[in-house]
Image (tube, rainbow, N blue to C red):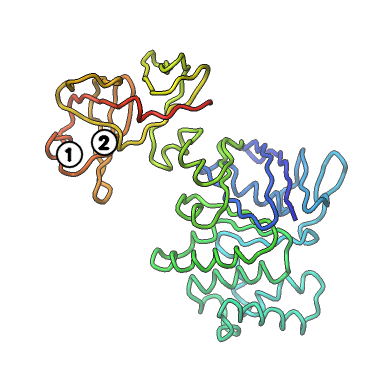
């Protein structure tokens, strides 16, 4: 049951134009900054926003194709949707909420209630079947919403920020439960999230959107190791440079350059782990290939490490120990020397 989609539509100032596929049994997480078009994409796949161009195909069956005048209504798509705030009906019990989607698809009342009860039992919520949403905890409400999405036996599962409404204390446990349910789902699943930890925990593959466009598509390891946009680099905590490679040297738009241990040509990305950035108050001795002078613009503590923001010919972020912050008096700002070994700069085609 492969999902194939090419989604093009205009919604306000957002021009969404994204094409991707999700295989049977695969979970894809869609990430991106606010306003990138993540939720719009999900709603378009569900049929809640009509396409202007493109298509949505599930297991070879067209659900929508404007140029061919094909458009299956949302209730006819066999798509299970779990919205960010769950959108449970406050006047209905947990059982009635789960049964709602079945009733909307023509299942008789008694049969819908029976199936809803089975799904609540699977979610370990059987004893809460008669309770209304206001009496449920955040984790329980999330499981009721997931049961409602799965009860219709969808061929495609769409989850919009499924953990966002949960308290931090329960999010980790519910994340594990959700992953277990996703592992059992036989069809393609698409999860929208803004949190990289949740994406890595839930998904087999990441799709990155920015300004309505797909900028990167790959496994969690591929995306986090070799980001292709500044937003992704910041997300995973790496320094990302873009320039023209001429052999081992990468010339940057600012006129500065860095040298790597590998050779390349043409437009490339150069990624640097902040832990590979060394800081010195005096110009370092020896012959490191990349040395320049900068200024400390800020220091941010992160557990047992500190991130130091350095401006200069090549602005970078360094990650050092609290002892190094004190020894170099980095909190006081001022001039600083940066050095990076050529072997610590990974270069790949842009």
Task: Name the quarter where the N terminus is drawn.
Answer: bottom right
Q: Quadrant of residue 297?
A: top left
Report how many numbered discs are placed on residues in the image: 2
Viewed as shown, does residue 7 lie left or right of 76? left
Which mark is first along the chain, 1 or 2? 2
Residue 349 drawn at (x, y percent) = 53, 26
Task: Pick whichever, 4 or 77, lies toward us.
Answer: 4
Mark 1: which secondary structure? helix
Q: Residue at x 51, y 33 (%)?
A: 228
Q: Quadrant of residue 236?
A: top left
Q: Residue at x 33, y 29 (%)?
A: 316
Circle 1: is it few (<14), some (14-19), or many (20+) Cα within 10 Å?
Answer: many
- Looking at the picture, does residue 29 appear above or below residue 109? above
Instruction: Identify the residue at the far right of this view.
Output: 68
Viewed as shown, does residue 31 lie left or right of 323? right
Q: Residue at x 55, y 37 (%)?
A: 210
Residue 275 drawn at (x, y percent) = 30, 38
Task: Pick whichever, 82 or 172, lies toward us.
Answer: 172
- Looking at the picture, does residue 152 appear above or below residue 256? below
Q: Residue at x 60, y 85 (%)?
A: 130
Asked if the residues shown at circle 2 and circle 1 are in contact, with their CB atoms under 8 angstroms apart, the answer is yes
- Looking at the picture, does residue 157 appear above or below residue 344? below
Q: CA distance from mark 2 to mark 1?
A: 9 Å
Mark 2: which secondary structure? strand
Task: Pick whichever, 23 or 310, lies toward us.
Answer: 23
Residue 147 drawn at (x, y percent) = 63, 71
Q: Quadrant of residue 234?
A: top left
Which mark, residue 65?
A: none
Which mark, residue 308?
A: 2
Task: Pick whichever, 72 or 207, lies toward us.
Answer: 207
Which mark, residue 325?
A: 1
């Amino acid at each position: 049951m492969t999902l194939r989609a090419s989604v093009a539509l205009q919604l306000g100032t957002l021009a969404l134009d994204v094409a991707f596929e999700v295989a049977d049994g695969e979970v894809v997480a869609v990430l991106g900054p606010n306003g990138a078009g993540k939720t719009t994409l999900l709603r378009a796949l569900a049929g809640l926003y009509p396409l202007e161009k493109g298509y949505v195909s599930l297991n070879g069956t067209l659900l929508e194709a404007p140029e061919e005048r094909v458009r299956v209504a949302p209730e006819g798509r066999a798509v299970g949707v779990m919205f960010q705030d769950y959108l449970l009906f406050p006047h209905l019990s947990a059982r009635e909420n789960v049964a709602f989607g079945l009733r909307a698809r023509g299942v008789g009342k008694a049969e819908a209630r029976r199936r809803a009860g089975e799904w609540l039992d699977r979610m370990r919520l059987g004893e809460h079947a008669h309770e209304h949403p206001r009496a449920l905890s955040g984790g329980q409400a999330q499981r009721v919403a997931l049961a409602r999405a799965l009860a219709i036996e969808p061929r495609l599962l769409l989850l919009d920020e499924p953990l966002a409404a949960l308290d931090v204390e329960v999010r980790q446990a519910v994340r594990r439960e959700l992953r277990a349910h996703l592992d059992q789902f036989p069809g393609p699943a698409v999860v929208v999230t803004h949190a990289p930890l949740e994406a890595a925990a839930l998904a087999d593959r990441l799709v990155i959107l920015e300004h309505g466009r797909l900028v990167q598509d790959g496994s969690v390891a591929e995306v986090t190791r070799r980001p292709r946009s500044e937003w992704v680099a910041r997300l995973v905590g790496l320094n990302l440079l873009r320039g023209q490679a001429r052999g081992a040297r990468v010339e940057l738009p600012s006129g500065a350059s860095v040298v790597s241990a590998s050779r390349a040509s043409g437009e490339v990305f150069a990624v640097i782990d902040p832990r590979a950035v060394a800081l010195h108050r005096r110009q370092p001795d020896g012959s490191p290939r990349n040395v320049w002078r900068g200024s400390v613009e800020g220091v941010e503590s992160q557990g047992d490490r500190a991130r130091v923001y350095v401006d200069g010919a090549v602005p970078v972020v360094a990650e050092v120990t609290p002892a190094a912050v004190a020894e170099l008096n980095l909190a006081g700002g001022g001039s600083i020397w940066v050095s990076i070994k050529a072997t610590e700069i990974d270069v790949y085609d842009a």
